[in-house]
Image: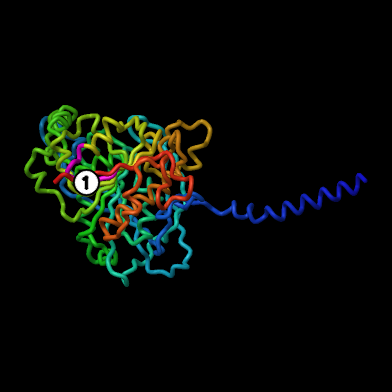
């Protein structure tokens, strides 16, 4: 009896193991940043294009060297900028796309946390030939936070490129993990860098990439200090109070005055090629960076994305106040309830989980309430809908003009029971 029982048990165990084997094998599929979770919304799926990726080194000549401002005199320098470019590639859609990105944790600068190299994989082909057979692609410029890097949002940059955009993400000098420096360099240079990259990409010649860029249809995407930058480039000039604070910080420099709303030269600098703005957790409102008049200057369609508990940029008196004050822009505000500031980055790298590391290596990426992979998928969905509307003329109203509170009704494009804990506000321009 005992032997028969043991044999039966082994047979049942083998039967269960056989049934579960496909599940085990499926679980071994490599999940990369930006891949769809089981509950990912509809527009988070990658597009039809296999993509290439390229690194470019650019130089913005004759810029104010604010870190060496002394005795009322502006020093000048040639400002280096590294960018990463993702684009539709001229390869078969069945081609296996794989790339390894090299990144670091830590911060060179005031905190002096050691730099720790790490790598992560993406779905792109390094230096692939650009696809030129289907016309030009709208340009997207991406600006990271302080501190950050051009690789901070690869889940989004790869995703957008696969949908027929040429995406350029900037390493902002003095503002990356590797070279973080005094904050006033970021205050001055963030918007200037974005404008420079737009002009560089628009005038790119002697390169196959130049032939596929539609710079007259440009979207700008920024996170945190990147949000501070893209809003200014989009038309929200900084306040006179912010300029005065910058002067106090630097010992009298007026270099930021070219970005102030009250400056007529700033008003004439708003670029008509920019058709849409996406601002993740933009920093500055609680610090007086904008006033009511400055916010009125933002007239580009804008998608704001925020956490309701953002303790870096602030929510009610920060991001939501910008949304409410930008009365001359068609605008949306997507809010992750109970999320904090990290509503834009990739998920935390595995290396950030190592024991003994400073918790900020993890909290550069993670949110305390939300799964970052879920946030990534939802961002892909709404950014796709928003940019597709304004850069490609798509009708995505069914995904954007929806019930404000996601707890009241399943949002279109979301699987049943998956669209909880979010709010989407929308407002039309008054002008």
Residue located beneath label 1 in the image: 428
Vertical arrangement, residue 139 with respect to residue 241, above or below: below
Which residue sits at x=32%, y=44%? 144
| Residue at figure coordinates x 60%, y 54% from the top left | 26
Vertical placement of residue 294 versus 24, above or below: above
Is residue 178 at least partly visible in the picture? Answer: no
Mark 1: few/some/many CA within 10 Å (<14, 14-19, 20+): few
Magenta segment: 325-333
Residue 324, image x and y in percent? 23, 37
Residue 396 sits in quarter: bottom left
Q: Position of residue 34 (x, y in %)?
A: 44, 51
Indicate left or right for 143 with 13 as reference. left
Kindly identify the residue that appears in the image at 47 percent across and 67 percent down: 95
387 sits to left or right of 1 = left
270 or 103, nearer to the observer: 270
Residue lying farthest left? Answer: 264
> Measured from the top left, where is residue 22 in percent x and y?
64, 56
Q: Is residue 267 left or right of residue 114?
A: left
Q: Residue furthest front?
A: 408
Nearer to the camera, 210 or 35: 35
- In this view of the protein, can residue 200 be seen by the observer? yes
Circle count: 1
The quadrant in which residue 257 appears is top left
Q: Position of residue 65 (x, y in %)?
A: 18, 39
Please tell me whether residue 236 belongs to the stretch shown in magenta. Answer: no
Kindly state the secondary structure of the residue where label 1 is placed: loop
């Amino acid at each position: 009896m005992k032997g028969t029982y043991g044999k039966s048990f082994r047979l049942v165990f083998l039967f269960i193991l056989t049934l579960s084997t496909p599940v085990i094998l499926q679980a071994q599929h490599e999940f990369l940043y930006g891949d769809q979770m089981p509950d990912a919304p509809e527009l988070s799926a990658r597009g039809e294009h296999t993509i290439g990726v390229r690194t470019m080194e650019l130089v913005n000549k004759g810029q104010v060297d604010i870190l060496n401002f002394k005795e009322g005199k502006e020093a000048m320098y040639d400002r280096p900028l590294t960018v990463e470019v993702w684009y539709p590639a001229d390869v078969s859609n069945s081609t296996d796309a794989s790339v390894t990105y090299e990144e670091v944790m830590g911060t060179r600068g005031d905190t002096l946390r050691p730099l720790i190299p790490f790598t992560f994989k993406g779905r792109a082909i390094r230096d692939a030939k650009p696809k030129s057979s289907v016309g030009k692609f709208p340009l997207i410029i991406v600006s990271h936070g302080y501190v950050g890097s051009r690789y901070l949002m690869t889940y989004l940059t790869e995703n957008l490129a696969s949908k027929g955009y040429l995406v350029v993400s900037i390493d902002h000098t003095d503002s990356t993990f590797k070279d973080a420096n005094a904050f006033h360099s970021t205050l001055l240079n963030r918007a200037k860098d974005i404008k420079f990259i737009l002009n560089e990409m628009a005038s790119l010649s002697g390169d196959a990439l130049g032939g596929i860029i539609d710079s007259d249809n440009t979207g700008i995407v920024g996170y945190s200090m990147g949000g501070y930058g893209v809003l200014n480039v989009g038309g929200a000039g900084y306040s006179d109070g912010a300029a005065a604070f910058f002067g106090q910080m630097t010992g009298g420099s007026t270099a930021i005055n070219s970005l102030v709303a009250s400056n007529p030269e700033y008003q004439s600098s708003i670029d008509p090629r920019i058709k849409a703005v996406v601002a993740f957790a933009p920093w500055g409102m609680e610090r007086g960076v904008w006033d009511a008049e400055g916010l009125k200057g933002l007239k580009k369609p804008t998608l704001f994305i925020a956490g309701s508990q953002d303790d870096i940029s602030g929510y009610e008196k920060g991001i939501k106040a910008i949304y409410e004050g930008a009365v001359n822009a068609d605008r949306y505000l997507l809010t992750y309830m109970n999320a904090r500031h990290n509503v834009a980055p990739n998920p935390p790298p595995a290396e950030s989980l190592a024991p003994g590391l400073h918790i900020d290596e993890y909290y550069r990426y993670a949110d305390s309430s939300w799964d970052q992979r879920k946030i990534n998928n939802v961002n892909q969905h709404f950014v796709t809908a928003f940019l597709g509307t304004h850069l490609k003329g798509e009708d995505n109203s069914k995904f954007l003009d929806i019930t404000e509170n996601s707890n009241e009704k399943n949002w279109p494009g979301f699987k049943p029971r998956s669209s909880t804990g979010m709010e989407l506000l929308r407002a039309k321009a008054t002008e």
